[in-house]
Amino acid sequence: MATAGSVNTFTTTLLNFPANVSHLFRSRWTVLHSETGASSYFLSTSRLRLLHSKSTVAALENEFSSCKFTDSSQGVRFGGEEFLTRLLARRWTLANPDTKISKVMFSATDTNLHDFSASHLFLGVDTDICMPNDVLGTDNSNQSFYIVRDDLLHPLINGNKARKLDGVLPLIEDNSVTDVVTCGGCQSAHAAATAVLCAERGLRSHLLLRGEQPEFLTGYNLMSTIYGNVTYVPRSIYANREKVLKSQADLVAGNSGSVLWFDDILSTSLGKQPRSYGRRVIVINEGAGDAIALLGLIRLVKYLSQDHLLGKHRVIKFVVDAGTGTTAIGLSLGALCLGLPWEVTAVMLADRIDGYKRQEKRLISEFRKHFGAPLDLDKDEVNGGIVNWVERLRQRKFGNVLDGEVEACRQIAQKTGILVDPIYTLAAWEMATFLSQKGAKANGDLVVLLHTGGTLGLFGLAQSS
């Protein structure tokens, strides 16, 4: 069994690896990008294409901050396009919002998706498509859906983890944070992504993982241990996440430090802050379930709505798996702000519908409080719910893998080259297939699946076998 001492020794050994693997442990880098500006000096070896911190310093000296235009007291009331243009004019973690779109094709034969032999119907994937031409020339003799390949963003920080942290890390840097505290399950992709991004910026991450330390460290659990400082929290104590996070943050800050919360930062528009001598600790909620995390998803929607991609006029059924639900809420909010005829269907995995609706209401309320809202955003429509929350086709307790699901993932990988995991992305894949077969295509609607990444979690299956 791995001990704290052996983990520290292992980490030290890795940090002393020769230069040919040093790119895995980059020093403090950051990204500067404006939706209306240009970025330069990208790292070609990383899909995140990061900029050196000197560029960031220059940008901040010119008052181009990640906090710019965040205070609703500034009278933020514009039309959707202008609202988003101003809202997204900030620094980002990702150098640009670009992503790849592929087309998955399968037989039009009606299939009972509760039978996982349905995976043999997939005919293949088209990775070289021109969206407008492809949509106009769609052959309805074979069903299909499109997949946004956010799983390809980065080997460790990909999918919705990268999107949710897109606007978070620059804000953390602007406020001279030294330590980040967050939490998640034992195989939390969010915790691992936070740890990697913090390490790249010279920040310390403190990760509270639910449950007991596994006998063997695998998958995201291993990455969290390598890049961050891991503490395992008994499930009974972890149930009160807010209390656990606050206690850990206070412990890290000590008597001479301070604890920051996103709500306070955004409410006061702190902007660029001088570095203090004590530790400055910030708390990121489980799964980055904070209003600031919505910005990265809204940025993605704006990118995808360009005419040469999904466009602004086609009815789209957007499908995503839901852990905390933040991703689905961000996508829906972006579509509403831009007036897009997109419906976001979120497959509920970790909570019941009442919990997801509470999360939706909370995040939208916080978004309005800190960022305002466009004039044409219908308050009644928002209050009525902006996400279509649905059950998984084969329901189960969160984290359980049913018979045939690993085989289904294998079949999909072999026939399309796309890797999905049985806990999260397979659920969204099933739903996208179901919607494609059950009428969305007949109505002329496009079905689009957002691949939320997290496939390193497949290695974690060994912990539950």
Image: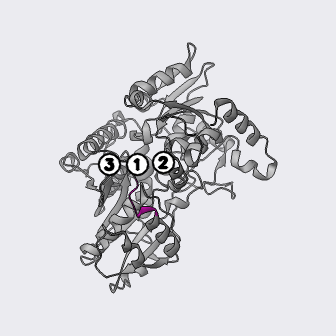
Q: Name the residue located 36 percent from the left edge and 40 percent from the top edge.
A: 371
Q: Quadrant of residue 450?
A: bottom left
Q: CA distance from mark 3 to mark 1?
A: 43 Å
Which label number is shown at residue 464? 2
130 relative to 434 in the view: left or right? right
Q: Where does label 3 land, which residue?
A: 78
Name the spot of residue 398 as percent of width and height, x first. Answer: 36, 48
Callout 2 crowding tier (Cα within 10 Å): few <14, some 14–19, many ≥20:
few
Q: Name the residue located 41 percent from the left edge and 30 percent from the top edge.
A: 238
Q: CA distance from mark 3 to mark 2?
A: 50 Å
Kind of element beneath mark 2: helix
**Amino acid type assigned to the residue bearing label 2 in the image:** Ser
Magenta span covers which residues? 401-406
Look at the picture and state if 84 lies above or below 309: above
394 relative to 236 in the view: left or right? left
Assess whether residue 221 is covered by the magenta stretch.
no
Look at the picture and state if 300 lies above or below 223: below
Q: Name the residue located 33 percent from the left edge and 49 percent from the top edge.
A: 329
Q: Quarter of the image for the N terminus: give it.
A: top right
